[in-house]
Image (cartoon, grey):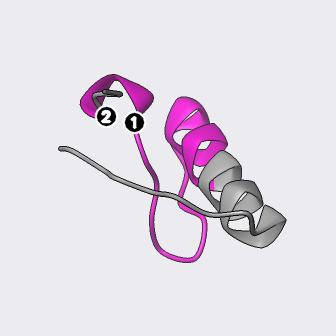
Amino acid sequence: MTVMLATHSPYIINHLNLLILAGRKGILEDNASLLLNDVRCV
């Protein structure tokens, strides 16, 4: 998965952090989670 994001919004960054934490714990946040290993930063 590739995610490209440019923002100054702390709300978007906070939500991404919640999704990553949910992925680490194996739970869902708002019916979703994000595994950081599946994201490639470029």
Q: Is residue 41 left or right of residue 12?
A: left
Magenta region: 19-39
- Quadrant location, the C terminus: top left
- Kind of residue at badge 2: Val
Residue identified by numbered label 2:
39
The residue under the point 67% across, 67% down is 12
Q: Are marks 1 and 2 in contact (CB under 8 Å)?
A: yes
Q: Is residue 32 above or below residue 22?
A: below
Residue identified by numbered label 1:
35
Q: Quick one: 12 or 19, which is closer to the camera?
A: 12
- Residue 24 on the magenta span: yes
Q: Quick one: 3 or 16, which is closer to the camera?
A: 3
Q: Residues within 10 Å of mark 2 (few under 14, many from 20)?
A: few
Q: Residues within 10 Å of mark 1 (few under 14, many from 20)?
A: some
The residue under the point 45% across, 66% down is 32
Q: Which residue is the extreme one toward the bottom?
A: 30
Q: Quick one: 6 or 17, which is closer to the camera?
A: 6
- Kind of residue at badge 1: Leu
- Quadrant location, the N terminus: top left
x, y (%) of residue 41?
35, 28
Disc 2 element:
loop
